[in-house]
Image: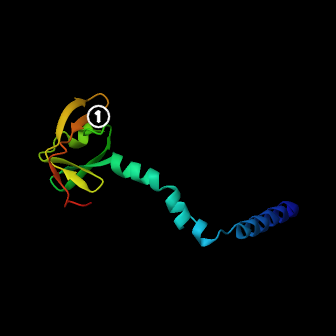
């Protein structure tokens, strides 16, 4: 029993020492400039393909932009009763969004945003 405890303690000490030896310079850490720049292209794609569904100014759900001409897929039960549906993509709010199709079985809705009806001052 004592040998098992000693072995366990030795493993803990070795693991702590190994972790201390693996410290990175600040520019290579998780929040470092190199790491942030490595993911910039993916961040931009996510920023422009993620949609926030709103009823007036209240967030009611999220969706994904599925085409450049303004089609957004979202959860139907979150948007079906919205009286004033709009969609924010990146920092642009598109007013007058329309629900085109709802599939109750899968609880999804296809929403169309009109690129002409936008409010750039919304900023989320």
- Which coloring applies here? rainbow
Foreground: 38 or 99? 38
Label 1, on which residue? 108
Residue at the outermost right position: 3
Q: Quadrant of residue 3?
A: bottom right
Percent across and percent down for residue 5 are 82, 63
Residue 31 in view (yes/no):
no
Residue 80 vs 86, above or below: the answer is above
Q: Is residue 23 visible?
A: yes
In the image, residue 109 lies at what x, y percent?
A: 25, 35
Q: Quadrant of the N terminus?
A: bottom right
Task: Give me the residue at 21% from left, 50% from top.
Answer: 54
User: Is residue 118 placed above or below 32 in the rendered structure?
Assistant: above
Compared across the picture, whether 2 is left or right of 68 comes to right
Q: Residue at x 54, y 61 (%)?
A: 35
Q: Is 100 on the left or on the right of 43, as rendered?
A: left
Question: In the rendered image, which quarter is residue 23 located in?
Answer: bottom right
Q: Nearer the viewer, residue 71 or 79?
A: 71
Say if 1 sits above or below 70 in the image.
below
Determine crowd level at label 1: few under 14, some 14-19, many 20+ residues with C-alpha closer than 10 A: some
How many numbered marks does the figure carry? Answer: 1
Q: Residue at x 40, y 53 (%)?
A: 44
Position of 83 with respect to 90 (left or right) is: left
Q: Residue at x 30, y 54 (%)?
A: 90
């Amino acid at each position: 029993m004592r040998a098992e405890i000693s072995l366990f303690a030795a493993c803990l000490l070795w693991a702590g020492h190994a972790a201390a030896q693996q410290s990175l310079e600040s520019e290579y850490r998780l929040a470092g400039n190199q790491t942030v720049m490595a993911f910039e292209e993916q961040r931009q794609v996510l920023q422009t393909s993620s949609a926030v569904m709103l009823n007036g100014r209240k967030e009611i759900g999220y969706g994904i932009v599925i085409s450049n001409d303004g089609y957004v897929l979202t959860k139907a039960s979150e948007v079906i009763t919205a009286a004033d549906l709009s969609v924010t993509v990146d920092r642009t709010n598109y007013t007058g969004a329309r629900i085109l199709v709802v599939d109750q079985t899968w609880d999804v809705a296809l929403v169309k945003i009109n690129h002409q009806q936008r409010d750039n001052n919304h900023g989320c």
